[in-house]
Amino acid sequence: MMRWAICALLFAATASAGTTYRSPDDLALSSDGKQLYVVCSGSREVLVVDTASQKVTGRADVGKVPRGIALSPSGTRFYVTNSWSDTVSEVDAGTLQVLRTLPTGFEPTGIALDAARNLLYVANRLSDDISVIDLASGAESGRLVGGRGASYVTAAPDGGHIYVSHIYPNIGHFREPPKSEVTVIDSAHRVVSARLPIANAAGIFHIAFSRDGRFGLAAEMRPKNLIPLAHVEHGWVFGNSLAVFGEGIHGVVQMPLDQIDTFPSLPFGVVISADQTRAYVSISGSNELLILDLPKLLKAARSPNAARLANDLSASAAYVIAHIQVGHNPRNIRLSPDGHFLYVANRLDDTISVIDTARAAVTATIPLGPSVPLTPERRGERLFYSSMYSFGHQFGCANCHIDSTFDGLSWDLEPDGFGKDIVDNRSLEDVKDTAPYKWNGGNPDLQTECGPRTERFFYRNEGFRGAELEDLVTYIKSIPLRPNRYRRPDGTLTEAQERGRAIFTRTVKKDGTPIPEIRRCSVCHSGPQYTATVSLDVDTGKSSDRSPLVDIPQLTNVVNSAPYLHDGSARTLEEIWTVFNPNDIHGVTNDLTKDELNDLIEYLKTL
């Protein structure tokens, strides 16, 4: 207790400067329900909360930006994914000391324990795969291919299968409806045994199973990115839904949570009561929790008309029975073993909401540390994740920029008719100092981009103005660049990367003729963020574009943000030059061999 008191004082000293927030993201409960383990992505720690006293009683230091947690059945160990360290911390639950640090793929997020086989399954968001870690040796015993943005992992109740969701859609053909999946792993054989296709979905989050394992639910978004956003006030930009699969259900059916005048924006966490009468869903954009009548939901999912219900705004009235307001940006949720209490991690409040399930009401709010004044960045982050400003409260910035990055989609944004000025959704990492903004460079600063433009062309409602707009812009400028996984720790380049850099910076073609300055990679993509901050015609325009000019994007961490080009028509970096650069306008690349183009791409991955 003395150690915890000292740590609390140290945290208070840091937080008083307005620099540290805990940002609770994931939760785990001991089997007896007495200890709640809270993963705090902002402060690199796991807090232990005594559920009886509702007080924080301990903490464990872990790696950078922890995101997920799995608890051993005995309760003596827990495992935490460190998404910016590319590791898992194995922690002694008694001493709260890290016992081992286990390697993973790029950006580990979700985690599940196969206790029978002493294995961990870890979803790696940026390497699109699943690490299988043998706990006896502490090493990876294999790496399984997942869908794009592999993120959240759930073990079936019988331990026979592991289910992995993905927050980005799989890369498809230009202007096709998004396609996602849930990856199913046969845990006995450590192989992917199935991929459950989920059509028209981009953003699959947490998965929950019934205690008998007969069915599962996954929180998801269904973006309407193929129709003009000019129709916000006439329809529905995101379908906030549950993907339902299992016994008696044909494939995967998508059951809406939305109603005609209510849009529970950005569903995230989901749990099912032990008696299978209720399901609970955290709604991170609307700051609420939904309670669902589970038998009625399953009845609709098993009906002959189930496939048609996905876009039926009257369907959810039959099974959504309560909306409960909680804190800002609720993330994962956990149900006590007796089913009496539900715990909600309020990421942007640094609190845990405690809900009495019988009363369907918040009965307590547990603070995770001393009260910290809100900085402009934190106020702006709350605005970024809120859906309260768009028409009908349908969506917010974070719907398209998932976890403050991007969504892997291209959108028809402007009110100019169907199919005009299609734009790729660019990442917001390291976006400060890269003006002008918008793909054609039409907005001189982020205040214009996020203020009048968002209000008029996105939200169709009164948007961000005055001090709120300044807070939002301050937050966006503060979004950090994730670690680059393709650079050596000492900063040196591999031989292939060095060859690629020589191509990137060359001034003459292979035949010795000069490359015009405006066609040199290093001229347009210059400076610390690899952009000359101007708009040019690089011959990638389409007949649907009103202007041939495109804003030169920054290239920092470009490897993470496929698809590419202003409209997202290039599925890979290679396609930029093999498919969409026939006239050598977008850099001079037609004299390169396949191996040389590969070297160029290897260098771009390091930026």
Image (cartoon, helix red, strand yellow):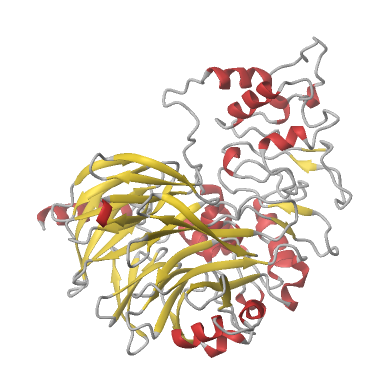
Q: Which part of the image, by quadrant, shows the N terminus? A: bottom left
Residue 161 image-quadrant placement: bottom left
Specify the farthest residue to the left. Answer: 2
Residue 579 image-quadrant placement: top right
x and y, in percent, of residue 418 in the image:
84, 64
The residue drawn where x is 65% and y is 48% is 426
x and y, in percent, of residue 590 in the image:
79, 24
Q: Is residue 487 placed above or below 158 in the rendered structure?
A: above
The residue drawn where x is 66% and y is 79% is 308
- The answer to whether residue 504 of the structure is visible from this angle is no
Q: Which part of the image, by quadrant, shows the C terminus? A: top right
x and y, in percent, of residue 393 in the image:
60, 75
Residue 389 shown left or right of residue 173 in the figure: left
x and y, in percent, of residue 176 in the image:
73, 57
Front residue of this view, candidates 254 and 381: 254
Residue 582 shown left or right of residue 524 in the figure: right
- The answer to whether residue 46 of the structure is visible from this angle is yes
Front residue of this view, candidates 127 and 534: 127
Q: Is residue 261 placed above or below 414 in the rendered structure?
A: below
